Image: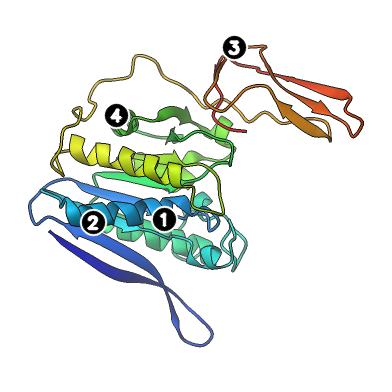
Amino acid sequence: MTITRDFLPILKGIDLTTKRLPLISAHSGIPGPTLWLTAAMHGDEVTGTAVIHSLFTRLRQFPLVKGQVFAFPILNTSGFETVSRQEPLDQQDLNRHFGATDTGSTTQRLAHLILSHILSTKPDYLIDLHTDSVNSIAYTLVDIPNKFNRPPLLNSLHLAQTLGLDWALDNQDSAGYPPENCLTGQLIARGIPAVTIELGGPLVVMDQFRHTGLEAIWRVLTALNMVTGSAIPFTSTSPTKVFVFEEKIRTQSTGIIEYKVKPGDKVTQGKLLGKIRNVFGDTIEIIRSPHTGVLFSH
């Protein structure tokens, strides 16, 4: 197995220097699946980058026996340097422009370049690593594009189940934007299984989530027989129960929140989620769950 480090040229600055995306790849030399990993789509979400570093460290000890793994450890390099969720040059969200052409804004052109490079490798699967909030569980989201073919969506569900984390479907109503505008949604719309993993909170590497992400990806590699080890087979059956990401619940009052449930807790419709208190400690708002389900994050 060979591990290579390279760069994808993306932008040229006023001083004529070229901005580049770091690219890491591992090649077994034996035909097999092509898995892509991406991280730091939002520049303040750093744990996914550490997951990719840890994965390639492990691959040096336990090499691929077939297939290949590609990774962009930092997609939004300018945002990473400035600790910014957005692309600093035009203050746009990179993960809302993967349906764009190569003649749009800076962020749209960057998204087009990233997507084109990933597609050029003929990927079989892609896992995009993000973070949610400090108070959250690790979970997987599967985007449902407005137009999709059933097999790629099912294969994305199989990938989500094989990762072994809590997971849910996400659509335009819950996301607030067309899912095909994000990287994973665009790939599913193109027939390529892809999922998003949310790993803890932003700004710092959260080690427990780094470990969780690493083990989830390693579970996929073993299930695909890309590395040696015992693992359950790659999931190939449709889930008997499908979870849908419903909504984000927002408070209507200014005050201090007191949570009554923890991320990962199962809740029933009407269950008390929290209370809002004013500066005197008086309760001014009661928050109850509008759904029966699982709370993913505060």
Give the x, y percent position of residue 199: 47, 42
How far apart are labels 4 and 2 at the CA level? 22 Å
- Measured in 3D between alpha carbons, the distance from the residue under mark 1 to the one under mark 4, in whole angstroms, is 24 Å
Horizontal arrangement in the rendering, residue 39 relative to residue 274 (left or right): left
Which label sits on residue 121?
Answer: 2
**Of labels 1 and 4, the one closer to you:** 1
Sort mark 2 into few (<14), some (14-19) or many (20+) by Cα contacts within 10 Å: few
Q: Please determine whether, in this image, residue 142 is positioned above or below residue 86.
A: above
Type of amino acid under label 4: His
For residue 181, side relative to residue 217 (left or right): right
Quick one: label 3 or label 4, which is nearer the N terminus?
Answer: 4
Q: In this rendering, which labeled residue sits more in front, label 3 or label 4?
A: 3
Q: What residue did someone put label 1 on?
A: 49
Res 268 label: 3
Label 1's element? helix
Q: Earlier in the sequence, mark 1 or mark 4?
A: 1
Which colour assignment does the render follow? rainbow
Q: Residues within 10 Å of mark 1 (few under 14, many from 20)?
A: many
| 218 and 102: which is toward the camera | 218
Closer-to-camera residue (224/156): 224
Looking at the image, residue 47 sits to the left or right of residue 187; the answer is right
Secondary structure under tag 3 reads: loop
> Which mark lies nearer to you, 1 or 2?
1
Which SS class for mark 4? helix
Q: Nearer the viewer, mark 4 or mark 2?
A: 4
Residue labelled with disc 4: 158
